[in-house]
Amino acid sequence: MQHFGPFAVAIACFVFLAVAAVAGIVADYKKRQLALEPLRAAIERGQQLDPAVVERLMAPEPRGEGLNALYVKVGGIVTISAGIGVALLSFFLAEVVPVALYPVLGGGIVAVCLGLGLVVAARVIERHAPRQETHGS
């Protein structure tokens, strides 16, 4: 790890994201295979299949209706809190390593801005959701 230096954290972060994405894809695939297993077994045995059952098993599982504004708002609040914590950490860290003040403070400010963006997005979702239900879309 000495060779990668400051990039080790970024590399580890992207590796984690890649593994999480692949794990999600594999889990969806396995779940779909388990749902279709009874259909395959019935076909192998030569049983007569009801078209309604086949259609129900072959249909993709319904996804959520959209973003829940509460979850987005909670994510924003947590992100703002983390950003404030990182910003405060920068002042304590500057006592030991003065050059670290502005980069760490900047990271905290970026996190606060991301959290504020999430809170604003939650409000937009809250305002858009009632209109979407009335328009039937």
Image (tube, rainbow, N blue to C red):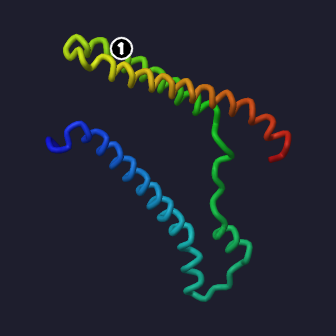
Identify the amino acid type marked 1: Leu
Q: Quadrant of the N terminus?
A: top left
> Does residue 128 sit above or below 57 in this rendering?
above
Residue 33 in the image: state x and y as whole percent.
Answer: 51, 69
Mark 1, Cα crowd under 10 Å, few <14 / some 14-19 / many 20+, is some
> Does residue 128 sit above or below 39 in this rendering?
above
Residue found at the far left of this picture: 2
> Does residue 102 sit above or below 52 in this rendering?
above
| Residue lying at 19% horizontally and 39% vertically, measured from the top left | 5
Residue 120 in the image: state x and y as whole percent.
Answer: 62, 26
| Residue lying at 25% horizontally and 16% vertically, measured from the top left | 93
Question: Is 57 situated left or right of 100 in this image?
Answer: right
Residue with the mark numbered 1: 88
Residue 104 in the image: state x and y as whole percent.
Answer: 33, 22
Residue found at the far bottom of this picture: 46
| Residue lying at 22% horizontally and 10% vertically, measured from the top left | 95
Of helix, strand and loop, which one carries label 1? helix
> Does residue 51 sit above or below 78 in this rendering?
below
| Residue lying at 57% horizontally and 28% vertically, measured from the top left | 117
In terms of depth relative to the viewer, which is nearer, 99 or 129? 99
- Residue 128 in which image quadrant: top right
In terms of depth relative to the viewer, which is nearer, 82 or 106? 106
Question: Is 39 situated left or right of 109 in this image?
Answer: right
Q: Total number of numbered labels?
A: 1
